Image: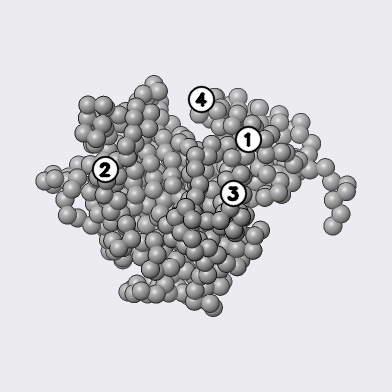
Amino acid sequence: MSTELRNFLALSYEELEDLNLQAKGDRLNRVAIEEIREKRLKYLTDEKRIKAVTVLFSDLEGRLHLLDYDKKFLIGAYENLTFDGSSIRGFTAQKESDLRLGIDWSAFYWVPADVFGTGKVLVFGNVIDKDGTAYAGDLRGVLKGYSEKLFKEKEYTLNAATEIEGFLFAGRDAEQTYHQTGKFEFISTGGYYHSLPLDPLRQFIDTAAEVQRAMGFQNEKDHPEVAPSQFEINYGYAEVVAAADQIQIYKLICRQIATKMGLTACFLPKPIVGVNGTGMHTNVSITKDGKNLFWDPEGLEKMSAFSWEFVDRILTHGNDLCLLMNASVNAYRRLDPHFEAPNQLKASATDRGSMIRIPIGNSRSARVEVRSVAPDANPYMVLYGIFKTGIEGDIAQIDNLRNAPRYLPDNIYDAIENFRKSEWTTKLLGEDVKGRYADLKQSAADRCPRALGTVVKAPEVQYHHEVYTQYLWNMF
């Protein structure tokens, strides 16, 4: 169709970066939400070239959903945006299906028109229950509420940054067609740092990095990873909810760019046996009045007693949390000690097989790195689980807790059992949400081979929560 009569918004990458960094600054500085809302509504009203606002939210498993609202409709109805919760896996039952979306005006993004289309902006939403409270199954809202509570009560700011690895495979929809092909095809075999400047993997990384920069990610470095066709694009720290939002946008950007190139960006933890899997190393810290509470120049590994207690609580509850961090059948292939798998329930400054690593840091960068997180996990659930456990969890009376010979489960069935039996996961999520999440994981496990073996089986890809189709699930 002709575009001659259309005048939709399409900003330069420089303009996008300026706008997104300003919005990010408002969020970081905790500008009153009423002030931000009025600013955004005025902008939407005045900017005639915007046709639609895309509202993003995530389901219980972390799958990202996008709803486009006509701009004029949204401006008049943003306080009463309803949707059918029974159509979202893990949300409400059919008999109590109505839910609402509340707009988080602080989480507003301007997007490159060549990637997302012209005339659109993005904003994250929180799911609201019928009684007007935050919906318990929306872990973004749960994380946001917990973060705000800690800031109000203790003046804590929760910070996070993730190192998200992925694979780039030949062909579009390579995961959906895996049951037909039985394999994934590399588009590059160079490995760590070895990639020609204009080969497909490098072009993909460069393009994704440009889009992230334009969306205010504040990039740090990017490179091919250890395995063939594997990539990692790093960016800076953010307040915890913004950090989780960026994980969702990161994967959306990668998938969209790969699709435009006729390729597939894949975040399965272990799509190919015999090469390194993909992780989402999760770096966390807590600040108060601008001071990093994890730093102590006189402490063990220059970390404070507060940070070591944080570590001890996560190690104590490591098996309880494993299903949150490794949420798919395929994730347990990655917990293989032959490929630097972080499957040991210990903390170390050097051993990359440890669940927790203590990186070299200073007063600004001191942090705890939780390495045993898969990239297909729900980022809001993971970060909520890490911070609430690290701050409020128990500390086991185990000799040499930080280096005891203990391991994470090597299969999802044991992880589900640990999760169901744990009193801590009930405190963390509540009985109802915990049960629904465990049932979703059980149903995925029951559709997949109990023994993983050495070949990636079609069912573990087909019924993976990020690539499933309703048609496939309804066959059972």
Residue 472, compared with residue 367, is above or below; it is below
SS for dot 2: loop
User: Upstream in the sequence, badge 2 or badge 1?
Assistant: 1
Which residue is denoted by mark 2 in the rendering? 349
User: Could you tell me how far apart the alpha carbons at marks 4 and 1 are, in whole angstroms?
Assistant: 18 Å
Task: Identify the amino acid type marked 4.
Answer: Asn
Residue lying furthest left: 399
The relative height of residue 121 versus residue 433 in the rendered view (above or below) is above
Q: Residue at x 37, y 38 (%)?
A: 284
What label does residue 17 carry, if any?
1
Q: Do the CB atoms of the residues marked 1 and 3 lie less than 8 Å apart?
A: no
Which amino acid type is marked by label 2? Ala
Q: Which residue is mark 3?
A: 206
Q: What is the distance, in whole Å, between disc 1 and disc 3 at their CAs?
A: 16 Å
Q: How far is mark 2 from mark 1, CA to CA?
A: 36 Å
In front of the other: 234 or 345: 234
| Residue hosting label 4 | 29
Residue at screen point 34% across, 52% down? 372
State which tag comes first along the sequence, 3 or 2: 3
User: Which kind of residue does numbered mark 3 sit on?
Assistant: Asp
Decide: marks 3, 4 in contact (CB < 8 A)? no
